[in-house]
Amino acid sequence: MLKRSTLGWGSVGALALLLVGLTIIFNTELAGWQIDLTQHHLYTLSRGTRRILKSIPEPIDLYFFYSRRAADNVPQLRAYGDHVENFLREIATDADGKIRLHIIDPRPFSVEEDRAAELGVTGAPLNAAGSKFYFGLAGTNSTNGHQAIAFFNPQKQRFLEYDVAKLIYRLAHPQKPLVAWYSDLPMSGGFNPQSGQMRQPWLVYRQASQLYNLQTLAPGSAVIPKDTRVLVLADPTHVPAATRFAIDQYALSGGHIIAFVDPLAEAAGTPGAPPASTGTGMAQLLASWGVRFNPAEVIADRSLALNVAGADGAPMLDPVIIGLGRAEMSQRDVITSGLSNINLDTAGFLQPIATAGTTFKPLLWSNTDAGPVAAQMLAGSFNPASLLQGLKPTGKRYTLGARITGKVRTAFPDGPPAGVKLPAGTPVLKSATKPLQLLVFADSDMLADFLWVHHLDLFGQSLPEAWASNGDLVLNALDNLAGSDDLISVRAKAGFTRPFTRVAALRHAAEARYRAQQQRLQQELRQTEQQLTLLQTRRNNKSTLILTPAQQREIQHFEAERLSIRKRLRAVQAGLVRSIDALGTRLKVINIIIMPAVFALAALAGAALRRRRRNGSRRSGEQS
């Protein structure tokens, strides 16, 4: 019989061999396998991203420029850099060889730095010697096209997957998307008969023309071009029935639409004429898409009112010309996150229709210090000061821009309107075949230059200088909807940096107690000084160098009280440290002892169960 010690050492050796074997198997056969147990699935690619990777026609090269050595001194940046690198490795693995990933750590003044600058990756200065920190991504395709993320901003880490998926999609589909543009605004420039001069195109229109294949739709167009990726409706004031039906059919086919509607379009009117208003035809289309819009009401906001020049030239607040900050924009949507400010002029508001069956997500909203006013009273000249004084806020936030998705209903259940003749062979849809992707904003003046850009005259050249993010919002919207449905479906994820909420709560509670003690100390100090002043006025001895016994007792009392309060403050701070240390100890015990013990017990229970089943089957075989 073998000794028990021999069996013990044999078991240890067998376990060691088993561990080495499992390690070899995991590093070879199961390389790249992972289980994402994070709360928001931070390490799992979305379905849209996976479909984009499967649809890559030709191989793409990705160059990840990351100054790893420089990031060692910044732990948070190093952690995010490692997260980005692991994410890119997963992208390359999931692309089945269609993505070749190159990870480059550029040294100062090296060829790699020149390559990064050539591909559009910028470096952040590190010191006066000229060293730079690189943290960006560039990609190239087989046709010499390239795209770049100049720098991975840690504040936009929630949109990491979207930004990388967008870069890959653009490299896989390098042709400019077709954008159909329908507008009653003078956006494209042309001859102005009133001034007798040529009118310059609006800046947002020029920018869109440079980035996309822009095609202007003529009034009365009965068909939307076949390959249209995005349909822009910029203040469609007078939309003929044939065009409304074409828009309806495009929406039913799962189109991508950006609509700017307006109760009062200041930019559309001629000087001295009342502003134009969005007609009822567009409101009918919006209602069929699940959006309620009343062209007879304008939102006035007292808290967001901007200064305008009054009749005498003095600045005054106008509650219908409002400026939205980050607090009035969705930080969970890719087109509004990161924008600084948006300016609107006589904007309306949007409401969801519950029975429409579409999803309504607000993007822009007013403050609670707002309320609707009749658009008719603003059509002529009015006094902003009187409007501001007479405004009655409702305490609600009004939606000024929204994203709508889903299968929509037709606005023409009886078929084409009377008198509308469609081209031969044009199919007529009576129900939605794909979900609609819609972005709608209750203002069209936001597109005009006067609300977001200054034009500087430099040596006879007009240079635009943006002072608001209106143009960025429009380009972000086009950029988002011009991609595929797979790209649009890639939503923002939770942030990679996870704060210690329990530690923060403990710190806030302790700081609250600290502030209370501090306020008490200051109050007692003021009371003591008042008592000292009162005692000084009642002194019989006029000498300022000799203190009365009452003053001495009061000063001694104050000193003792101050020392006591300081001691209590130190106790509060020490309690904070002890609470945090105790929490850290509990976490360490859970992670180091309890969780491994749970997995070990589960493994032993599984092994015992298998042994019992094996012994049971062996006994049954012997009995038979």
Image (tube, rainbow, N blue to C red):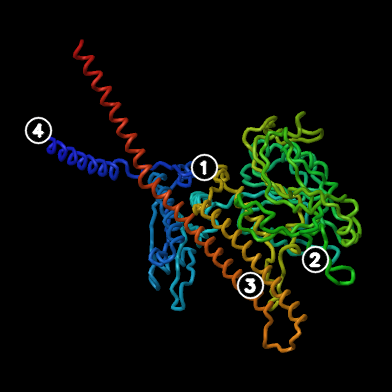
Q: Residue at x 68, y 33 (%)?
A: 357
Q: Nearer the viewer, residue 436 or 241?
A: 436
Q: Amino acid at mark 2?
A: Asn
* Residue at numbered disc 4: 2
* Residue at numbered disc 1: 48
* Residue at numbered disc 3: 558
Q: Count all numbered tags in the image, as a single digit.
A: 4
- Using the rendered view, name the quadrant where residue 294 is placed: top right
Residue 516 point in image, percent of width and height: 63, 61
How far apart marks 4 and 3 lie (CA) works out to 82 Å
Q: Amino acid at mark 1?
A: Gly
Q: Callout 1 environment at 10 Å: few (<14), some (14 to 19), or many (20+)?
A: some
Q: Callout 3 environment at 10 Å: few (<14), some (14 to 19), or many (20+)?
A: some
Q: Quadrant of the C terminus?
A: top left
**Is residue 467 left or right of 3 when viewed as pictured?**
right
How far apart marks 4 and 2 lie (CA) works out to 95 Å
Secondary structure under tag 1 reads: helix
The mark nearer the N terminus, 4 or 1, is: 4
Q: Amino acid at mark 3?
A: Phe
How far apart marks 3 and 1 lie (CA) works out to 69 Å
The mark nearer the N terminus, 4 or 2, is: 4
